[in-house]
């Protein structure tokens, strides 16, 4: 099962509880796998929130049994260096500093670190040292916020 398929299965349950599934990190190779879910909401995330989502998701995964073998389930907040994956994430954090790793070189480079100027459904624009770079969302490998002072 891919991360996208897992997200499609889990998102309705997580959203019914009042949270957003921001990212899934699934490492399911070998005998011990790991499924790490990152959740968020406007008020922020605490331990009780992670426990609540973990219980609901565990019950769903036990019933649906979409993942073969043994794995550990972790639920966490996105953290200060949160991964940005959806157009809404980029729109929400416009004006913040980001680190972007591209799958393929754009303008001769794969790494960009700068101020997120804007975004839409197809691209983001990042200002790196006074030069604006338009980066297609479809070819972004990873994008993260840079914590203040980092």
Image (spheres, grey):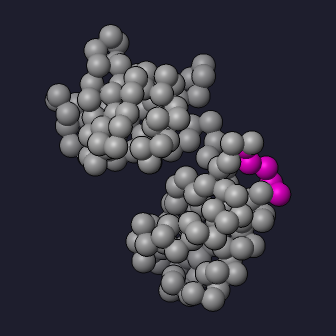
Task: Determine the residue positioned at 68% across, 77% down.
Answer: 58
Q: Note whether 18 is above or below 82 in the view shown.
A: below
* Residue 110: quarter of image: top left
Q: Residue 18: x and y, percent?
A: 70, 58
Q: Residue 85: x and y, percent?
A: 44, 48
Can residue 51 be seen here?
A: yes
* Camera-side residue of 33 and 87: 87
* Camera-side residue of 140 and 91: 91
State the residue lying farthest toward the right.
48
| Residue 89 covered by magenta stretch | no
Decide if residue 110 is on the left or right side of residue 12.
left
* Residue 117: quarter of image: top left
Q: Residue 94: x and y, percent?
A: 48, 28
* Camera-side residue of 26 and 22: 22
What segment carries the magenta color? 44-48
Count the marks: how many? 0
Task: Determine the residue positioned at 66% across, 56% down.
Answer: 19
Q: Residue 146: x and y, percent?
A: 53, 29
Task: Determine the residue positioned at 61% across, 55% down.
Answer: 20
Where does the N terminus fall, quadrant-wise? bottom left
Task: Determine the residue positioned at 67% across, 66% down.
Answer: 16
Q: Main secondary structure of the magenta part?
A: loop
Where does the C terminus fall, quadrant-wise? top right
Can residue 102 be seen here?
A: no
Decide if residue 16 is on the left or right side of residue 127.
right
Decide if residue 65 is on the left or right side of residue 91.
right
| Residue 47 covered by magenta stretch | yes
Q: Note whether 127 is above or below 25 in the view shown.
A: above
State the residue lying farthest toward the left.
108
């Amino acid at each position: 099962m891919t991360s996208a398929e897992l997200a499609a299965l889990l998102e309705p349950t997580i959203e019914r509880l009042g949270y957003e599934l921001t990212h899934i990190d699934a490492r399911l190779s070998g005998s011990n796998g790991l499924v790490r879910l990152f959740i968020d909401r406007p008020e922020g995330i605490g331990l009780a929130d992670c426990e609540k989502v973990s219980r609901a998701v565990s019950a769903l995964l036990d019933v649906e049994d979409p993942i073969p073998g043994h794995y550990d389930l972790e639920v966490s907040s996105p953290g200060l260096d949160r991964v940005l994956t959806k157009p809404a994430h980029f729109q929400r954090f416009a004006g913040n500093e980001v680190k972007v790793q591209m799958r393929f070189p754009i303008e001769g480079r794969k790494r960009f670190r700068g101020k997120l100027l804007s975004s839409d459904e197809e691209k983001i624009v990042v200002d790196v040292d006074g030069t604006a770079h338009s980066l297609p969302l479809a070819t972004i490998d990873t994008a993260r916020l840079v914590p203040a002072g980092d």
